[in-house]
Image (cartoon, rainbow, N blue to C red):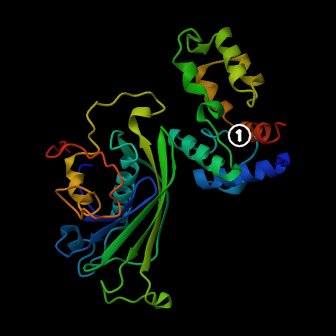
């Protein structure tokens, strides 16, 4: 199954409209799930469930939204920021997220801003168009 | 569960779907205030009825070992009033279960013959649709924040045993020839109730 990036985006938008109760036009590629769209922790599971149904594939939550594994490890966090080791660990885990801005100030408070609509589209796109 | 709001289960397919009934009576005190001279069941209590039905269905998939709590109301649409004398049929289906959470869909209907109201005559003899309610439950011990909760399962206590009397294949209760006999229920210990 191949899908264009735009088709993926449209489907992801449908998932987010249903899961978060927001309007279509609020869902832009740059919108952050928590800050802009008001997602809470249970919503992330809801989004995972709906993505699995919409795209007919398995979506391991810790692969799509892998934050808490990092935050609980003292080696990767120091003074409220990710250490160099933490950053490289994050880079490995989230090839679907754009870290350019974040790397300038890798404060853990800003991790939430990495969870964008685009990150989900990238993730799904890489999964279904992998081969 | 701190209180029981449904009356009993009448169908139970482990991991798939369950149906519970709730009979609405004017002896429920809140109906005298909601509203004086015009008693209608509050919609929030229909959501509670679905949460209990679906929550027990989800809990049974882990033999009532997980602490299953309502986490999100995805959808709640109501089509008609419910009044004293109505007999409600609450049907819940599991859509997804994962280690951390579960999603359910469900509908509430009024059993025909349980009331004289025929608002929705178009559907004839079929049960009348009252509500569509989709929910999400969290498994507390697998919460994403890593919070710890007491070891004792304060969600599922012995109090729910009686709800399952007609669907649990058990020498003491229910029909031993029941077709649900193959289901292995892991019922919580009897006679203990958490303080609410």
B88 sits to left or right of B130: left
- Name the residue located 67 percent from the left edge and 16 percent from the top edge: A89
For the C terminus of chain A, the quadrant is: top right
Quadrant of residue A102 in the image? top right
Say few, some or many: other residues with alpha carbon within 10 Å of mark 1 (under 14 / 14 to 19 / 20 or more): many
- Name the residue located 24 percent from the left edge and 44 percent from the top edge: B188
Query: Is B94 rendered above or below residue A36?
Result: below
Q: Nearer the viewer, residue B57 or B26?
A: B57
Quadrant of residue B90 in the image? bottom left
Q: Nearer the viewer, residue A98 or A36?
A: A98
For the question of whether residue A26 can be seen, the reply is no
- Name the residue located 78 percent from the left edge and 48 percent from the top edge: A8
Pinpoint residue B30: horizontal percent, then vertical percent: 22, 67
Pinpoint residue A95: horizontal percent, then vertical percent: 75, 27
Quadrant of residue B162 in the image? bottom left
Which structural element holds mark 1?
helix
- Which residue bears the numbered disc 1? A120
Pinpoint residue B80: horizontal percent, then vertical percent: 42, 78
Pinpoint residue B67: horizontal percent, then vertical percent: 35, 40
B121 sits to left or right of A110: left
Q: Nearer the viewer, residue A68 or A38?
A: A68
Q: Nearer the viewer, residue B171 or B18?
A: B171
């Amino acid at each position: 199954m191949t899908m264009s990036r735009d088709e993926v985006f449209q489907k992801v938008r449908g998932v987010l409209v249903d899961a978060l109760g927001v309007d279509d036009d609020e869902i832009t590629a740059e919108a952050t799930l928590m800050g802009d769209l008001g997602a809470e922790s249970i919503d992330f599971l809801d989004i995972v469930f709906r993505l699995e149904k919409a795209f007919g594939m398995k979506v391991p939550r810790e692969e799509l939204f892998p934050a808490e594994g990092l935050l609980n490890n003292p080696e990767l966090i120091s003074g409220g920021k990710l250490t160099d080791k933490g950053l490289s660990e994050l880079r490995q885990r989230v090839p679907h997220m754009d870290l350019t801005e974040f790397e300038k100030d890798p404060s853990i408070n800003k991790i939430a801003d990495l969870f964008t609509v685009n990150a989900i589209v990238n993730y799904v796109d890489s999964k279904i168009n992998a081969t | 569960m701190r209180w029981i709001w449904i009356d009993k289960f009448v169908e139970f397919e482990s991991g798939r779907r369950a149906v519970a009934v709730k009979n609405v009576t004017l002896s429920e005190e809140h109906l005298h205030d909601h509203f004086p001279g015009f008693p209608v069941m509050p919609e929030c209590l229909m959501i509670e009825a679905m949460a209990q039905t679906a929550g027990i269905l989800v809990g049974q998939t882990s033999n009532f070992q997980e602490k299953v709590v309502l986490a999100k109301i995805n959808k709640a649409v109501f089509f008609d009033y419910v009044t004293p004398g109505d007999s409600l049929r609450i049907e819940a289906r599991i859509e997804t279960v994962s280690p951390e959470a579960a999603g359910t869909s469900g509908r509430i209907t009024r059993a025909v013959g349980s009331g004289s109201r025929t608002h929705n005559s178009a559907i004839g003899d079929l049960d009348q649709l009252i509500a569509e309610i989709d929910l999400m439950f969290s498994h507390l011990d697998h919460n994403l924040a890593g919070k710890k909760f007491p070891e004792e399962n304060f969600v599922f206590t012995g109090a729910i045993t009686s709800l399952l009397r007609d669907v649990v294949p058990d020498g003491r209760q229910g029909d031993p020839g029941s077709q649900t006999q193959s289901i292995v229920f892991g019922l919580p210990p009897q006679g203990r109730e958490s303080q609410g």
